[in-house]
Image (cartoon, rainbow, N blue to C red):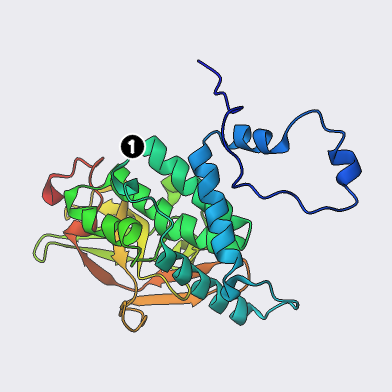
Amino acid sequence: MRTPVFSMEDLSFVPDLPSGPLDVYRNRSSFDWKRLKLALEGDIELLKLKYRIWQTLERDPLFAHSPVTLSVEEQKRMTQLQLRRINQLNFHPKDLATSSYSKRTRTVMTINEAIQSLNPSVSVKMAIGMYLFSNALLSLGTERHLKFYEATFVDRQLLASFALTEIAHGSDARLMRTTATYDPQHKQFVLHTPDFEAAKCWVGNLGRTCTHTLLFAQLITPDGTNHGLHAFVVPIRDAATLETYPGLIVGDMGEKIGSIIIIDTTAISKCGLLIYLSLIEIIV
């Protein structure tokens, strides 16, 4: 594999470091720090993208750092406003949605890294609510789930969450107890949390803002057979009002912890099941 050569690249877009007490040590360096930065990034276009993001957001008063520690409520409000502004600015290259998996992944990682250095909370909301969710749809879903992918990744109109962990089972997928029982009469899955220990917990984005979640539950067919853990796209809130749908108990668990959801009983269309890896004939 050939080592990329960066010596001829124009790095004038990288601003010089401000002069200060470290100059004496920087001047002793035997290498060009800008060339090293490019070598670590590996792609000049991605490095340009990072600086475009930083320079754009640094000029925006919404991203100015507060001189005092904000309340938890205000932090969450500002994080949501910042995420909305980033979605409006749309740093995605025009061909990103149709690019190869490796290029798409590397680009969204670059965007997320740039955002993370300004506000880690926004970075996490993006990583979970947009990128993790959309990648799962592409990996596990079918053509009927493309509308969710486009709404999340392309149009950036849908913010999602990832509901796997349960109170009593951490991330031990085999022991998850939330159920999704298929109702052939109505062609729906009936989702249910049997008790508090089976509540989905520590779910980022779920407490206040997401409209959908990727929920993992044991798939039960009408004959009572458990076909193991499957993923479902579950509507959580009305996008216009952010009111939680009936049958769901959603709670915000406070600073840095996440959210919790208990499903009393709610039904979703069979199209909500991501079936790419499923062999259940009833929902094909």
The front one of 273 and 31 is 31
Callout 1 crowding tier (Cα within 10 Å): few <14, some 14–19, many ≥20:
few
Disc 1 element: loop
The residue under the point 58% across, 28% down is: 8
Q: For the residue marked with disc 1, what is the amino acid?
A: Ser
Q: Is residue 253 visible?
A: no
Q: Describe residue 108's horizontal placement relative to residue 239 as left or right.
A: right
Instruction: Residue at 61%, 27% (x, y): give it.
Output: 7
Q: How many marks?
A: 1
On screen, residue 244 versus residue 84, left or right, reads left
User: x, y percentage for residue 57?
Assistant: 56, 65
Q: Nearer the viewer, residue 7 or 247?
A: 7
Q: Which residue is mark 1?
A: 100
User: Relative to 176, does residue 76 appear above or below in the rendering?
Assistant: below
Q: Residue at x 34, y 72 (%)?
A: 236
Image: 31 above or below 199 = above
Residue pictured at 47% horizontal, 65% vertical: 86
Q: Where does residue 193 sit, x and y in percent of width and height?
A: 38, 66
Above or below for 3 versus 106:
above
Give the left or right position of residue 250, taking residue 76 as reference.
left
